[in-house]
Amino acid sequence: MHLNPCGHVCDICPSYQGEDDRQCSGCLDTKGKPWWGGCKLFECVRTKGVNHCGVCNEFPCDIQVGHFDPSNPKGQQNAIMRTGVLAYWAKHGENKTIELVKRVHGL
C-alpha cells in the first residue's frame, strides 16, 4: 500500500491500478509529478522537511484541505478523508494507518 505525503492512497486510484488511460506510478515514484502535473502538497512537505502533512506544525492548513479536483463531485469529501488519514497517521504510525485504510476501502 502506498500512502502519499498528502494522505492519498495510490492503491485506490484508477490511474495507479491501470484502469485508466492515464497511467501513474504514484507521487513517491514520480516525485510529486503525476500525470496531471506538479503537486503543491508534495512540494510543500519536501520544502518543510516533513514526512507527511499530518506531522507539519501547520496541519491542517488551507492548502491541504483545499487540495482536490473541483470537477470531481466527491473532491472536497476526499480532501476531508485525507485529512483524517493524516491525523491518524501522525498519531498511530504508518502500519496502523495502512490497516485502517484497507478496512475502510475493503482491500
Image (cartoon, rainbow, N blue to C red):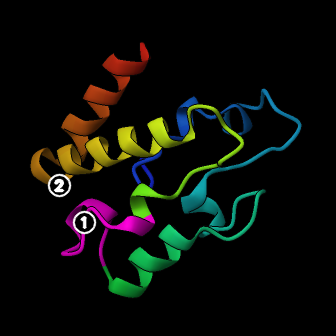
| Quadrant in the picture for residue 61 | bottom left
Furthest residue to the left? 91
Residue kind at label 2, given as amino acid type: Ala
In the picture of the structure, the residue carrying the numbered disc 2 is: 90
Q: Which residue is drawn at 58% across and 59% down?
A: 27
Majority SS type along the magenta span: loop
Q: Is mark 1 on a helix, strand or loop?
A: loop
Q: Position of residue 7 (x, y in %)?
A: 39, 49
What is the magenta range?
50-63
Image quarter (top left, top right, bottom left or bottom right) of the C terminus: top left
Q: Is mark 2 on a helix, strand or loop?
A: helix
Nearer to us: label 2 or label 1: 1
Residue 49 against residue 21 in the figure, above or below: below
Residue 76 against residue 62 in the figure, above or below: above
In the picture of the structure, the residue carrying the numbered disc 1 is: 59
Q: Position of residue 42 (x, y in %)?
A: 50, 69
